[in-house]
Image (spheres, coloured by chain):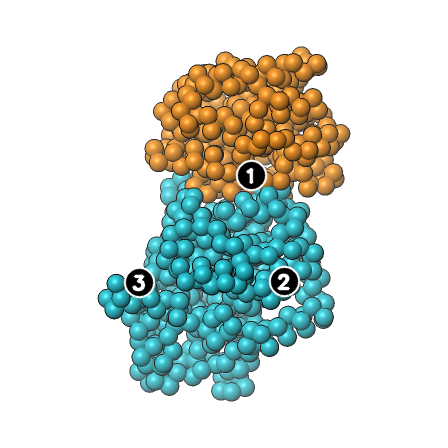
Chain colours: A orange, B cyan
Amino acid sequence: MESYGSLERHLRKARSSGRKILVPYVTAGYSPEWIDTLHHVAAAGADAIEVGIPFSDPIMDGPIIQAASTMALNRKVTPLSLLNELSSESFDVPLVVMTYCNLLFHAGIERFGGWLSEAKISGTIFPDLPLEESEEWSNYAASKDIDNVMLVSPVTSDARAKEISDRSRGFVYGIGLMGVTGVRTTLEESASTIATRLKAVTDRPVLIGIGISNKDQARTVGKIADGVIVGSALVKLLIEGGGPQGAYDFISSLREGLDEIDG
Amino acid sequence: MTVDHEVDLSADFDGKFGPFGGRYVPESLMAALSELEEVFSEATSDPVFMATYREILRSYGGRPSPITKCHNLSRELGVDLYLKREDLNHTGSHKINNVIGQALLTKRMGKSRMIAETGAGQHGVATATAAALLGLKCTVYMGEVDTERQALNVFRMKLLGADVIAVKSGSRTLKDAINEAMREWVACVEDTHYCIGSAMGPHPYPYMVRQFQRVIGDEAKAQLLDEYQLSPDYVIACVGGGSNAIGTFTAFVETDSKIVGVEPEGGAAIGRGVLGVIHGMRSQFIQDEFGQLEEAHSISAGLDYPGVGPEHAHLAQIGRATYATVNDQEVLDAFQRCSRSEGIIPALEPAHALAYLFREAGREIPHGSSVLLTMSGRGDKDSEQVAKILGYLK
C-alpha cells in the first residue's frame, strides 16, 4: 500500500509549487447555506476544506464550534444527510471530514467509509482517536483512498510524534496550543515550536491548527509549517451571519497573508 | 447458567475489560493519562502511600463503615437484608473513598489543582472536601440544570473553597459537565488533575476508581463472614457510572454470590444502550440511530448519565452480573419505605437498589436468601426534592 492517497498527493503538489497550504474548517449543516459557503471558501483560495460533522459531545471544541454544531443538530441534520448533500456537489479541492469517533464506530467502519466515498471525501480527522486505537480505521480508509489524518500535541514526545507522523496520511495535524478550538487574540509560541518539531520528524505536509485566527498568525506559523488550519475564526463569522461572501472575504485575506510568505 | 468465575481483575496491561474500556482522548491528554497510570501503579505498591490513604479513610472518612442487618425489612420481605453503610462516611456517600485516593495522587504528581464533574453534587462536594484537606485548588463543573436542582450542594462546595462552574452547553446536565471538565483539562493538564468521580472515562480511570472503591466490597465480605458467618446469596447495588457497584462487586466476582446492578429506567445504559466510544471509553451508551449521545432521565441526578463504566458492560456481557431497571415511582416508594421501616433515609441512588429488592423479594430473589445491598449515600441531599414531589413543600 502506498504511504498516502490523493489528499496528500494534492497537498504535496501545492507545497512543491511553493504555495503555503490553507485549510479552512466549516461546520456542516450550520445553516442551509453551508454548501454555498464551501464553494465560496474553495474559490477564495483554500487548498482543502475541513468539513465538521456535528457531534452531540465534542470534547475538543470550544464554544464557537459547539454553537455551530448545536445549530446544525437543531436543524435535525444527521451524518448521513450531510454527506448525502455533499455527494451531489463537485469541488476543485479535496474535502476532509472532521468529527468524533463515536459516529464512525456507531455506523461501523465499512458503512461509514461507504458514506464518505459516496460524498467524495478524501480524508478524515478524529481528534479522539489516538495512535493506539487508530490502526483499523487508518488501514481501511487507506484502502478506499481516504487519508486518515493524525494529530500531534505540544506535549507529545518526539519519539511519539514520529510514530504518529508515520501512521498519519494526508498531512500531519500539529495542535498549536494546549487547549480546545477557539479564537485567540495572540499566537502561542507553542504553534511555532510544534511546527519546527514536526518538520524535523516527517516529510509529510505539516499543518498547524487550533489557535490560528487571523492573517498575521497564519503568516507567522506558515513561515515554519507547510500551512495552517483555520476553524473557529471562520465559524464565528458564519454563525454571526457573515454568510458565504463574508467567508470568501476572510479566506481571501488569509490567502493573501500566506502568499506574502517568501517561499 | 454457567458463569465465568475467572474474571480478570488486573486490567493492568491495556485497560480493556473484554472489548470495553480503552483510551479514546485527544492526543493532548495522552501523556497525562500515561503519567497517571504510572504514578497510580507506583503509589499503590508503595506502603507509605497506602498507609496514608488508609489512615485518612479511617480517621477522617470514618472507615470501616458498618454492616447493618435490617431486621424490620428482612421480616417484611422474607429475606435477610444487610446494608453496607457507605451513607455513614464523611460527606455522606462512598465518593470519599475515591477522591482521597486521587487527591493523594495529585500531590504525588506535583500538581496543585483538581477539577471534577458532578451531577447531584456528591462527587463535587467530596472532591472539594479532599482538596480542602490536602491544600489543593479545586474547580467543579456542574450542569446549569443541576446547579438549580442542587443549589445547597453548590453552596457546600463554595464553602469548602471550590469554584463551581455552571455548564451551559448541550443538555446542561452531567454529561455536559464531563465534556466541559475534559475541555478544561486539555488546557491545563500540566498543573491540574482531573478527578473523575465514577469508574468510567479513559484508562486508567475505570480501573483506578474501582481499586479505590473496592474497599466497600472487601470490607463487607469480611464483615459478613466475621459477624454473621455468611457469604451473601445476592449482592445488589445501584449503577449510574457504576463506582459504588463495581467497588462492591469486585470482592464477589469470584464467589458464588449472584450479582445485580440496578439502573434507572431512563438511564439504563446496559439495559437499552448500545456500544459506543464516548468520554474516553468504549462502553454502552444511550444514543440515537446515528450515534449522538442522548440525555438520561432519572429522578436521581447522580444516576442521570447515559453511559456506564466499561467493567459493568463487560460483566453484563459475560453473564457474571445481571442488570435490572426500576422506575422513578418505585424509587420514591422505596425511599419512603426504607425510611419508615428502618429509620434510614437513603439517597435516591441506592433507593434504586432497594426498589429492585422490594419488587423482587419472593420472586427473582427467593425467600430465605441473604442479600448484601450497598447503601451508597444518605438521603439528606434529596429530602427537599422528594418533599416537593410528594407535595410537602412547594
Reading the image, the residue beneath label 1 is A180
Q: Amino acid at mark 3?
A: Asp
Task: Please tell me if label 3 and label 2 are on a single chain.
Answer: yes
Q: Is residue A173 left or right of residue A39?
A: right
Rendered residue at 42%/72% (across/down): B378
Q: Are marks 1 and 3 on the same chain?
A: no
Q: Secondary structure at mark 3?
A: helix
Q: Nearer the viewer, mark 1 or mark 3?
A: 1
Q: CA distance from mark 1 to mark 3?
A: 38 Å
The relative height of residue A188 versus residue B228 in the rendered view (above or below) is: above
- Nearest the eye: A107 or B106: B106
Question: Dot 2: within a 10 Å radius of its alpha carbon, few (fewer than 14), some, or many (20 or more) residues?
Answer: few
Q: Residue at x 54, y 35 (%)?
A: A181
1 and 3 marks in contact (CB < 8 Å) = no
Question: Of the residues under marks 3 and 2, which one precedes in the sequence?
Answer: 2
Amino acid at circle 2: Gly
Identified at 59% across, 43% down, the residue is B187
What residue is pinned by disc 3? B328
Q: Position of residue B207 (x, y in %)?
A: 58, 60
**Residue A10 in which image quadrant:** top right
Give whichever of A114, B168 is nearer the camera. Answer: B168
